[in-house]
C-alpha cells in the first residue's frame, strides 16, 4: 500500500519542465504579446472610426496617436472619442467634408434628372406622368 501511494504521488507531483528563468521569460513574452494584441485591436477600431469620420489617411493618423492610447482593465480602448476629436482639431485637412469643391466647379458634367423607374411611376398621378418624356416612360416600363 505504501508503495502504491508513492507511485501516485510521483505521478501527480512532477518537477517543472522549465527553470524559473525560463518561466519568467515566457511570462514576459506572454505579457508582450498581450500588449501587441491590445494595440492591434485598438488600431483596427480606431482606424475604422477615423475612416467613418472621413479621414483620408487613417493609418497615418493612428501612427501619430499611438502614444496617446489608454486602455481599461479588460484591455479595451477607452479614449477613442478624445483621440478622434484631437486629431480632427489638430489636422482638419486630413478629414474630408461633405461639400468638396473642385477647381472645375463641375465643368463638363451634364445635369441629368434622376433615372425614371417603375416604382417612381407608380407613385405619380396621371397628370404628372403626362408631363414626362414618353421615351423615358417607355424605357422605364421596359427595363424594370
Image (cartoon, grey):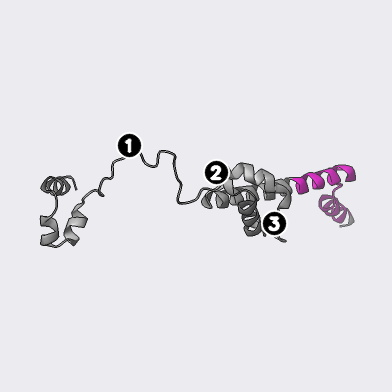
- Magenta stretch holds residue 7: yes
Q: Residue at x 17, y 61 (%)?
A: 124
The secondary structure that most of the magenta stretch takes on is helix
Tell me the distance, in whole angstroms, between the alpha carbons under discs 1 and 3: 53 Å
The magenta segment is: 3-32
Crowding near pointer 2: few (<14 within 10 Å), some, many (20+)? Answer: some
Position of residue 55 in the picture relative to residue 142 (left or right): right
Tell me the distance, in whole angstroms, between the alpha carbons under discs 1 and 2: 26 Å
Tell me the distance, in whole angstroms, between the alpha carbons under discs 2 and 3: 27 Å
Crowding near pointer 3: few (<14 within 10 Å), some, many (20+)? Answer: some
Residue 128 lies, with reference to residue 48, above or below; the image says below
Q: Which residue is mark 3?
A: 75
Q: Residue at x 26, y 45 (%)?
A: 112
Position of residue 113 in the picture relative to residue 67 (left or right): left
Position of residue 88 in the picture relative to residue 68 (left or right): left
Crowding near pointer 1: few (<14 within 10 Å), some, many (20+)? Answer: few
- Magenta stretch holds residue 106: no
Q: Quadrant of residue 111?
A: top left
Q: Which residue is mark 2?
A: 56
Q: Point out the tag, 1 or 2, that comes first from the N-terminus.
A: 2
Q: In terms of secondary structure, where does tag 2 sit?
A: loop
Q: Point out the tag, 1 or 3, that comes first from the N-terminus.
A: 3
Q: Point out the tag, 2 or 3, that comes first from the N-terminus.
A: 2
Q: Residue at x 13, y 48 (%)?
A: 133
Amino acid at each position: 500500500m505504501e508503495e502504491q501511494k508513492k507511485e501516485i504521488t510521483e505521478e501527480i507531483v512532477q518537477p517543472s519542465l522549465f527553470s524559473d528563468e525560463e518561466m519568467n521569460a515566457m511570462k514576459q513574452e506572454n505579457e508582450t504579446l498581450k500588449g501587441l494584441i491590445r494595440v492591434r485591436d485598438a488600431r483596427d477600431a480606431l482606424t475604422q472610426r477615423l475612416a467613418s469620420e472621413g479621414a483620408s489617411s487613417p493609418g497615418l493618423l493612428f501612427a501619430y496617436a499611438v502614444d496617446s492610447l489608454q486602455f481599461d482593465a479588460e484591455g479595451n480602448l477607452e479614449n477613442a472619442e478624445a483621440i478622434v476629436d484631437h486629431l480632427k482639431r489638430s489636422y482638419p485637412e486630413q478629414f474630408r467634408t461633405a461639400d468638396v469643391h473642385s477647381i472645375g466647379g463641375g465643368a463638363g458634367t451634364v445635369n441629368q434628372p434622376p433615372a425614371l423607374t417603375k416604382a417612381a411611376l407608380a407613385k405619380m398621378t396621371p397628370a404628372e406622368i403626362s408631363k414626362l418624356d414618353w421615351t423615358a416612360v417607355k424605357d422605364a416600363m421596359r427595363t424594370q
